[in-house]
Image (spheres, rainbow, N blue to C red):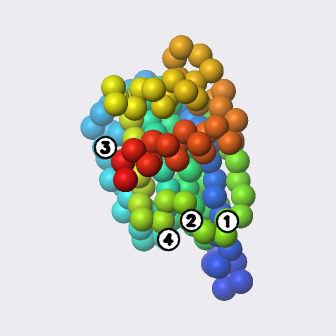
Amino acid sequence: MTSSTSDAHILMSMTYVSRANPDVSAKDFNEILQQAQANNAANGITGMLTFNKDYFLQTVEGPRAQINRLLYALIADQRHHDLQVIETRELKYRKWAKWSMNYASPTESNAAIYLKYSTTVDFNPYLLSAESALDLMTELSAQRA
């Protein structure tokens, strides 16, 4: 299946959350991040990822066909499960245009940001609305700029 030229200019955003499999190590995660950065750059995808030891929360942006292909690959990836798409929408412009994949993990310096958006003591992105997920990643991204 090839993307048509009319589809190539339609920018999409997709935000999803998933649970990391318990055997995903820090080394595995670094490989996931490096692989995502390389693949995304090759496919015109940009985005933001946050990960703690239990959850992935990610927004990806790019041509509609590429985002759809990525979704199928994410669903098949055995390193995580319970993938739930929080939001998809068309974009006029990219929010994370300068990053093939920006990344933030919980640290002491950003703990207040996670707490601001958390509905429980332990951060659980499954409980975030689409707007809260985007706001969280926007604030984390601004801290890294």
The residue labelled by disc 2 is 94
Q: Is residue 138 left or right of residue 37?
A: right
N-terminal of the pair, mark 3 or mark 1, is: 3
Residue 117 in percent (x, y) is at 58, 29
Which quadrant of the structure image shows residue 9?
bottom right
Specify the label residue 91 is tagged with: 1
Mark 3 Cα within 10 Å, few/some/many (few <14, many 20+)?
A: few
In the rendered image, the residue lying farthest to the left is 27
Mark 2 Cα within 10 Å, few/some/many (few <14, many 20+)?
A: some
Position of residue 108 relative to residue 101, above or below, is above
The residue labelled by disc 4 is 44
N-terminal of the pair, mark 1 or mark 4, is: 4
Specify the label residue 30 is tagged with: 3
Residue placed most toward the observer, 13 or 66:
13
How far apart marks 2 and 3 lie (CA) works out to 25 Å
Circles 2, 1 touching at the beta carbon (< 8 Å): yes
Badge 4 amino acid:
Gly
Q: Residue at x 71, y 83 (%)?
A: 6
Residue 125 in percent (x, y) is at 59, 30
Q: Dot 3: what SS?
A: helix
Q: Residue at x 63, y 58 (%)?
A: 13
Which quadrant of the structure image shows residue 127?
top right
Q: Which one is in front in this view, the residue at disc 2 or the one at disc 3?
A: 2
Residue placed most toward the observer, 135 or 77:
135
How far apart marks 2 and 1 lie (CA) works out to 7 Å
Badge 2 amino acid:
Arg
Q: Dot 2: what SS?
A: loop
N-terminal of the pair, mark 2 or mark 3, is: 3
How far apart marks 3 and 4 lie (CA) works out to 21 Å
Q: Dot 4: what SS?
A: loop
